[in-house]
């Protein structure tokens, strides 16, 4: 069964009043800019630990580093860096869901998508596409936010693919997405059948 991807599978991010001035008052603009600059500096210091956890887990599943990997989603470059630091050499990165359609079936030994499905940023219809481009016995690795009701549809889709014997859960474990964040994420590793 072929799934059609929606034209915009990833939800666009909304701009807030802290990034788009709604005033021309100098003091208010200065306050908003200072707030934005402070938040930007904090975001630049974020230490993504889920990507490193995924790289360590993949290293345990593959006996050598000569495997072809795809990092997919809004933090693909961060995942690519973590996998490269672990010793993997053949790593592609893709941010746009619409480009998945152009990838041949069974192209990758593993597809890694860390953070893409957190906060419902991507459609659960992407799971069949990630499985389609993964080689048989290859791995699909992704994170979901722990205890997030809005992500139940994503887990339902993953369970549906398992029930239809498209893939099988190999392991899952909880951990921090960001080093100093309070929220937890769950890393799922599925093996394509």
Image (cartoon, rainbow, N blue to C red):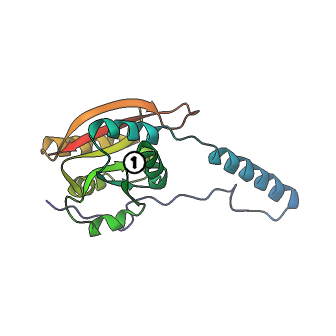
Q: Residue at x 27, y 66 (%)?
A: 103
Dividing the picture into quadrants, the one containing residue 23 is bottom right
- Quadrant housing residue 32: bottom right
Name the spot of residue 17 as percent of width and height, x first: 68, 57
Q: Which residue is mark 1?
A: 117
Frontmost residue, 166 versus 107: 107
**Residue 63 % position (x, y):** 26, 40
Question: Where does the image place residue 1, in percent across and percent down from the top left?
Answer: 13, 59
Q: Could you tell whether 38 is left or right of 137 in the image?
A: right
Image quadrant in which you'd find residue 167: top left
Foreground of the two, 8 or 67: 67
- For mark 1, give the secondary structure: loop
At 59% from the left and 33% from the top, the residue drawn is 180
Query: Mark 1 packing: few (<14 Cα in 10 Å), some, or many (20+)?
Result: many
Residue drawn at the location 12% of the way across and 44% of the way down: 165
Residue 150 x/y as whole percent: 40, 42
Residue at the spot 36% in from the left edge and 68% down from the top edge: 7
The answer to whether residue 126 is left or right of residue 31 is left
């Amino acid at each position: 069964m072929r799934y059609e991807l929606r034209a915009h599978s990833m939800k666009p991010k909304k701009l807030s009043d802290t990034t788009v001035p709604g005033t021309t008052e100098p003091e208010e603009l200065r306050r908003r800019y200072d707030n934005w600059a402070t938040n930007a500096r904090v975001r630049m210091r974020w230490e993504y630990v889920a990507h490193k956890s995924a790289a360590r887990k993949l290293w345990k599943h593959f006996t050598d580093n000569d495997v072809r990997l795809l990092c997919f989603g809004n933090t693909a470059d961060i995942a690519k860096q973590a996998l490269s630091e672990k010793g993997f050499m053949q790593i592609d990165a893709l941010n746009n869901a619409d480009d998945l359609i152009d990838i041949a079936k069974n192209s990758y030994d593993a597809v890694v998508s860390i953070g893409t499905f957190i906060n419902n940023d991507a459609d659960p219809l992407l799971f069949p596409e990630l499985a389609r481009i993964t080689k048989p016995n290859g791995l699909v690795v992704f994170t979901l936010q722990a205890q997030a009701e809005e992500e139940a549809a994503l887990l339902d889709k993953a369970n549906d693919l398992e029930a239809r014997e498209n893939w099988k859960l190999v392991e899952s474990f909880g951990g921090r997405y960001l080093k100093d964040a309070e929220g937890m994420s769950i890393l799922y590793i599925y093996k394509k059948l």
